Image (tube, coloured by chain):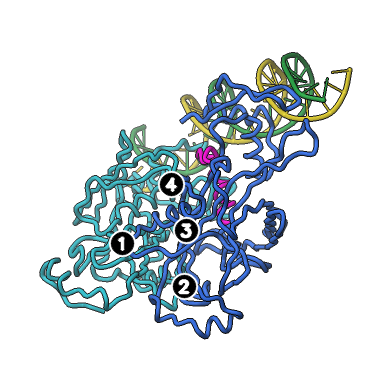
Chain colours: A blue, B cyan, C yellow, D green
DNA sequence: CTAATAGTGTCTATTAGACAGTATGTT
DNA sequence: AACATACTGTCTAATAGACACTATTAG
């Protein structure tokens, strides 16, 4: 494809010939979530967990130098579901990652080049599986979600070097279409409509926590209940009470005879997912 | 477009020139649900409610003479969400119908003509709003869902003249992709992958009953709690206990001072949706 | 010993399930 | 009167929330 680097977006669009492509193109964007540990200052304290999302810096127009979700075109001879698998493989060198279709975005002007429709997928992965280093330009961003009054949501992404802050308003609809429509109030650093994809994914994940076992795709083989609870807490954005959490999770996990020690406090039993 | 009628599918495909179209096309299919009354034999008994879905008989290849969901191509200058609205308007002459995106289907060979990706939408409507008669070839089918053992689901659609029966197996996945994949075991009369769309919609609707107010899109302005309960029962596929149902629904409805009489039994209060 | 987390017991509040009973129209 | 549905009261079972308590390690 076209790899020439253009100085300005105007210049790029002037030289861009949509007829070289199809009238309508289909892409996939992958919202890849994982959990990261933020090391504690105190040797006794456990690491703090955060949600993290993989972003890629764009090297060319449109949206040059902005961040976006990894993605790409769906090939004509490739099933829609296969595209995100192929992209994830090229991006992380991993196969068998949990993938679920999120939503298909199709506003007319979402891509300034031409008409592009994009089906987004949510991927969940345990970071410990990621041995290979990331492709150039890719980076994991910690996610912090602030749910505020008036249905305005603030999301801050941080990879240690860059901070991305965007704001979305959830507008309640009358009765037609889905419950909410979303309006981007502030967004300087993310490309396309990717702020919407990130919010949709966070909400979907939050809902799915209750009635599915998707979390375990983000957990290592063995984990403590404390760790699992922290992942729940960070996804739900609130503290849970220990006994209540353990009651609910009991049916989904099996205790192993291994223990996690060395934390400066009572060791904890390691559990694994009960299928 | 091409309206010539071909005698056989082979003949049709021979004359069909994919290069006349784009390499890749996007369509929408609309799964339109409503509730129908089956009149009771006994004057005292209340009408039995059934889910119903709108199907259209195909007049041309591919899948000539099979039934399919109403749908059509997404125009290049039309937002994805607008396409189902436009199609519903032309099909039912109604606007402001509840629409929600369901899923995007993108298997390579789902349409024998060319590569077609289809985003399906679920529409919910109160049948009383449908004053105009349906387009030729369109018909409402009552839906009966039989959930059997081994994750095999039987669905029977009936419009009084035609009976469509298909069977889908829900295959549990390991961890990658969604919880289930679906396999069509038997399907003689529905076009494309539309059996999957219908099942996906029924399951989505069932889930959304619990945590949203979508049902009210299928209800008239005024309704009795008995009617509302019947709609719940037919969607969930099970009987509910009166007191439990009334406790749960109480926050979502307001009692009016109107009554429904003439049923050969105690009149019931009419309620409306509390927003 | 102390800080920090692991893990359990138990009381209470809330919600769901079950069933019986009363109410009131039409024929 | 009889049938059919409307509607309510209440007991019980199950679940969720809250809090206090005990256990066990590294330093």
Q: Residues within 10 Å of mark 3 (few under 14, many from 20)?
A: some
Helix, strand or loop status at disc 4: loop
Mark 3 or mark 1, whichever is nearer to me: 1
Q: CA–CA distance between discs 2 and 3?
A: 23 Å
- Looking at the rendered image, the disc whose residue lies closer to the viewer, 2 or 3, is 2
| Magenta span main SS | helix
Q: In the image, which residues are magenta?
A: A199-218
Q: Which mark is residue B79?
A: 2
Quarter of the view holding residue A138: bottom right
Residue A11 lies left or right of residue B220; in this view the side is right
Q: Whole-Å distance between the Cαs marked 2 and 1? A: 20 Å
Chain name for mark 3: B
Task: Give the number of the mark in front: 1 or 4.
Answer: 4
Q: Are marks 3 and 1 on the same chain?
A: yes
Q: Secondary structure at mark 3?
A: helix
The residue that appears at 59% across and 21% down in the rendered structure is: A258
Q: Nearer the viewer, mark 2 or mark 1?
A: 2
Kindly identify which residue carries mark 4: B177
Q: Is residue C15 left or right of residue A212?
A: right
């Amino acid at each position: 494809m076209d790899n020439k680097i253009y100085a300005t977006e105007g210049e790029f669009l002037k030289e861009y010939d949509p007829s070289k492509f199809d009238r309508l193109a289909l892409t996939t964007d992958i919202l890849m979530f994982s959990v990261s540990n933020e090391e504690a200052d105190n040797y006794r304290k456990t690491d703090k967990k955060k949600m993290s999302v993989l972003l890629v810096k764009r090297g060319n127009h449109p949206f040059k130098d902005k961040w976006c979700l990894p993605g790409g075109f769906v090939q004509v001879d490739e099933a829609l579901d296969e595209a995100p698998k192929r992209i994830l493989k090229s991006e992380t060198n991993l196969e068998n990652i949990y993938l679920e279709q999120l939503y298909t975005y199709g506003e007319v002007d979402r891509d300034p080049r031409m008409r592009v429709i994009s089906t987004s997928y949510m991927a969940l992965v345990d970071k410990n599986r990621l041995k290979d280093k990331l492709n150039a330009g890719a980076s994991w961003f910690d996610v912090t979600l602030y749910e505020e009054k008036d249905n305005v949501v603030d999301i801050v992404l941080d990879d240690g070097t860059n901070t991305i802050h965007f704001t979305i308003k959830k507008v309640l609809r009358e009765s037609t279409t889905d419950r909410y429509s979303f309006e981007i109030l502030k967004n300087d650093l993310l490309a396309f409509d990717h702020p919407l994809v990130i919010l949709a994914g966070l909400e979907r994940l939050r809902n799915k926590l209750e009635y599915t076992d998707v979390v375990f795709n983000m957990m290592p083989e063995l984990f403590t209940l404390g760790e699992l609870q922290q992942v729940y807490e960070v996804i739900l954005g609130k503290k849970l009470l220990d006994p209540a959490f353990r009651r609910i999770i009991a049916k989904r996990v099996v205790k192993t005879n291994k223990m996690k020690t060395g934390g400066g406090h009572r060791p904890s039993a390691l559990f694994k997912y009960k299928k």
